[in-house]
Amino acid sequence: MRNLIPFMTRIPLKGDFEKARREIWAFPLLAVITSALPALILYLGVPLRNVLALLLLYFTIGLLHLDGLADWADGVMVKGDRERKIKAMKDLNTGIAGVFAVVMVLLLQSYSLQLLPFYAIFLAELNSRYAMLLALATKKPLGNGLGSYFMEGMDKKQLLIGSLLYLVLLLPTVVYSPKSIFSVLGLLAGAYVIRLSLENFGGLNGDCIGATAEITRAGTLLILALSHHHF
């Protein structure tokens, strides 16, 4: 896992890029690290805790996934054939679809967090990281970028270990708060992004995986907010 941290977060550690893709199974474990500071802020209940928690989250993980979300949305929303959609996704300029997607994801997360207990950010990050693992498990790369590189290292053993880790990390929270089980539904958001990516682009690249991570996190927080309000 040590080699994975510098490539998936902004934490200043040295890691081996080749070894990192052999540690894909540890994606769910990253949630413990990336959600630690945001969860602390939420737990302490400081003013504007939902906004500060989000700022700390992105300070820890960086903005790469948000950038991917913007590019992905531009590609999905443009009209035309697959080649035109891929070209729009790879365009360096961000269109209105990308801006809208980023703003909506940030708003959903911010407003949901103020209605939820502190550990909700951990559940959302856990789903986000596991959804990335599932995206890599499709083994359908688009291009030869970072997504393709990690897909090459993905195998059934890593998927199995990662899935078991996901369940092990989820279980204590569900025991502590049974309503937390609703967080699993957030993975449907990630599955939908993966499906849209395959339909629109014929494969997944780093932008698609970044979009999967961001939309899964936002979807999980929204579902948890609705479940805590109605149940």
Image (cartoon, rainbow, N blue to C red):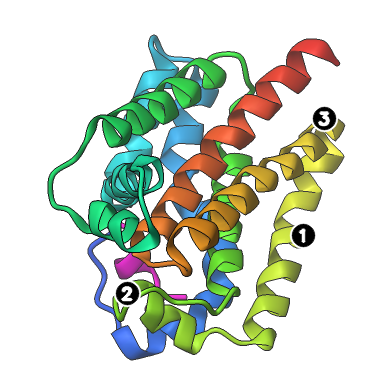
Instruction: State the residue in front, 93 or 23.
Output: 93
Earlier in the chain: of badge 1 and badge 3, it is 1
| Label 2 Cα neighbours within 10 Å, binned few <14 / some 14-19 / many ≥20 | some
Badge 1 amino acid: Leu
Quarter residue 48 falls in: top left
Span highlighted in magenta in the image:
1-10
In the figure, is residue 204 to the left or right of 194?
left
Image spot of residue 9 (x, y percent): 33, 58
In the figure, is residue 52 to the left or right of 138?
left
Earlier in the chain: of badge 1 and badge 2, it is 2
Earlier in the chain: of badge 2 and badge 3, it is 2
Residue located beneath label 1 in the image: 167
* Residue 119 visible here: no
Compared to residue 107, the image places residue 172 above or below, namely: below
Residue located beneath label 2 in the image: 146
In the figure, is residue 83 to the left or right of 180?
left
Compared to residue 32, the image places residue 7 above or below, namely: below
Image spot of residue 213 (x, y percent): 48, 50
Compared to residue 86, the image places residue 193 above or below, namely: above
Q: In whole angstroms, how far apart are the C-alphas of marks 1 and 3?
A: 15 Å
Which of labels 1 and 2 is toward the front? 2
- The residue lying furthest to the left in this view is 93
Secondary structure of the residue carrying tag 3 is helix
Compared to residue 165, the image places residue 169 above or below, namely: above
| Label 3 Cα neighbours within 10 Å, binned few <14 / some 14-19 / many ≥20 | some
Instruction: State the residue in front, 137 or 93.
Output: 93
Q: In whole angstroms, how far apart are the C-alphas of marks 2 and 3?
A: 36 Å
Residue located beneath label 3 in the image: 179
Badge 2 amino acid: Leu
In the figure, is residue 98 to the left or right of 178?
left
Which of labels 2 and 3 is toward the front? 2
